[in-house]
């Protein structure tokens, strides 16, 4: 047999193996997609009937080899992963399924205030208000109201969902927030990754203080985050007291252990920091990144101009999974901005709204 024929047969065998491998991956991804889409359709049908939304209600979004799990309970982001060439699931957002599985505020939406408000007290337009103190770290109010409420599914497709909810002044006046808001949160999964967008509108009769935040945890596949590297765009951070409430001081990161403007290994650093004065690119976007140079994985969290702060938390206090993932929390204002309105607190007049978005992109480092 000629060398040419041998070469041709060898090529065909190699090509056929590639086709089989490709079909196997396609079959694995399609099977997972079919399972997720089916569960998503069932969840949407459930949510649009008269049956109540519970903390176990979940919807699945899919795009190519990416999948996301969300819930109308709190409009929460519960998991984000991709399916690799071997058919294995690889988490991008460290998550959970079922309401009882949540740890450390995973995937919570933080509206109308992200972070802590010291003693739950604040002043706005000359009036003093007292919020419920619901913080396990001390007598503070923390992370708003909407993360433990059932939201309405406004729109749902195979790769996108929009949740909506209203807070009314009459209901929340007794809890220290006599303002009315309409809120929308959208998750959109596509070729550029996962986009999370929000809109908040003042539907009341008086101006309202508003802040927005999100609480996802990220992983690049390590058991603990210590050997991962992180890049944080903050040029300064808030000084906290022993109750994790800002003292009012803003500290420059230069020359401190908390300067992560260039990639550095996380090590044993106990992150629980609110970074501000974010570095931005020419388009006004700020990006925080987590990477593992051994597994060649990088996750970019890119925030638009509405996000002025980012909290980074290493999860040390999560009892059964300390330091399993890194929380990178986009926030439109800094912690305790209700008492420091110059820290980018929004003052929405009746009829006014504001919107923002952040994106999560996973990359394989070449």
Image: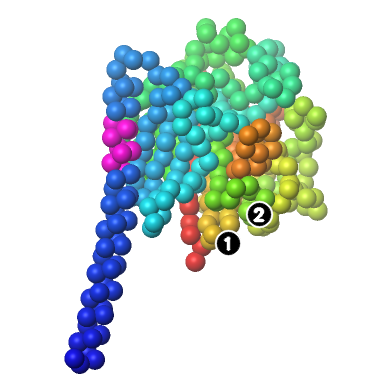
Which mark is on residue 12? Answer: none
Q: How many marks?
A: 2
Percent across and percent down for residue 286 are: 58, 48
Percent across and percent down for residue 181 are: 49, 19
Look at the picture and state if 316 lies above or below 184: below
| Circles 2 and 1 in contact, beta carbons < 8 Å | yes
Q: Is residue 40 magenta?
A: yes
Q: Which residue is identified by label 2?
A: 227
Q: Is residue 167 magenta?
A: no
Instruction: Kindly identify the residue that appears in the image at 43 percent across and 24 percent down.
Output: 56
Per the picture, the main secondary structure of the magenta-coloured stretch is: helix
Distance from label 2 to label 1 (Cα)?
A: 10 Å
Circle 1 residues within 10 Å: few <14, some 14–19, many ≥20: few
- Toward the front, the furthest residue is 1
Helix, strand or loop at disc 2? loop
Q: Does 144 sit left or right of 196 as displayed?
A: right
Please report whichever mark, 2 or 1, sits nearer to the chain's N-terminal start: 2
Q: Is residue 324 visible?
A: yes
Magenta span? 33-41
Instruction: Kindly identify the residue that appears in the image at 28 percent across and 35 percent down.
Output: 38
Q: Is residue 346 visible?
A: no
What quarter of the picture does the N terminus occupy? bottom left
Q: Does 4 sit left or right of 321 as displayed?
A: left
Instruction: Kindly identify the residue that appears in the image at 39 percent across and 56 percent down.
Output: 86
Q: Considering depth in this image, is 339 or 216 the residue closer to the camera?
A: 216
Circle 2 residues within 10 Å: few <14, some 14–19, many ≥20: some
- Quadrant location of residue 276? top right
Percent across and percent down for residue 176 are: 63, 12
Q: Which residue is identified by label 1?
A: 294
Percent across and percent down for residue 178 are: 57, 11
Helix, strand or loop at disc 1? loop
């Amino acid at each position: 047999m000629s060398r040419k024929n041998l070469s041709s047969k060898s090529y065909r065998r190699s090509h056929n193996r590639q086709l089989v491998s490709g079909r196997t991956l396609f079959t694995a991804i399609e099977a997972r997609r079919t399972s997720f889409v089916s569960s998503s359709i069932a969840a949407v049908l459930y949510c649009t009937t008269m049956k109540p939304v519970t903390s176990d209600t979940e919807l699945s979004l899919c795009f190519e080899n990416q999948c996301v799990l969300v819930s109308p309970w709190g409009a929460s982001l519960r998991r984000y992963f991709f399916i690799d060439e071997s058919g294995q699931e690889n988490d991008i957002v460290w998550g959970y399924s079922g309401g009882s599985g949540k740890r450390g505020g995973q995937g919570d939406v933080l509206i109308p205030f992200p972070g802590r408000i010291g003693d739950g007290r604040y002043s706005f337009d000359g009036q003093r208000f007292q919020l419920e103190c619901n913080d396990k770290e001390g007598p503070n109010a923390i992370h708003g109201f909407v993360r433990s409420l059932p939201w309405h599914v406004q729109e749902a497709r195979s790769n996108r969902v929009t949740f909506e909810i209203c807070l009314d002044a009459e209901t929340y006046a007794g809890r220290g927030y006599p303002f009315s808001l309409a809120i929308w949160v959208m998750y959109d999964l596509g070729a550029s990754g996962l986009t999370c967008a929000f809109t908040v509108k003042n539907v009341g009769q008086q101006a309202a203080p508003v802040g927005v935040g999100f609480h996802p945890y990220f992983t690049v596949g390590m058991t603990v985050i210590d050997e991962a590297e992180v890049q944080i765009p903050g040029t300064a951070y808030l000084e906290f007291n022993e109750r994790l409430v800002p003292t009012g001081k803003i500290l420059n990161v230069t020359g401190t252990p908390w300067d992560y403007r260039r990639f550095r290994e996380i090590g044993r650093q106990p992150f629980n920091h609110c970074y501000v004065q974010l570095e931005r690119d020419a388009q006004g976007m700020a990006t925080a990144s987590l990477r593992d140079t051994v597994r060649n994985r990088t996750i970019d969290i890119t925030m638009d101009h509405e996000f002025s702060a980012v909290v980074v938390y290493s999860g040390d206090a999560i009892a059964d999974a300390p330091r399993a993932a890194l929380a990178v929390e986009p926030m439109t204002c800094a912690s305790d901005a209700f008492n420091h309105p110059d820290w980018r607190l929004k003052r929405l007049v009746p009829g006014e709204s504001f919107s923002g978005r952040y994106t999560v992109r996973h990359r394989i480092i070449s």
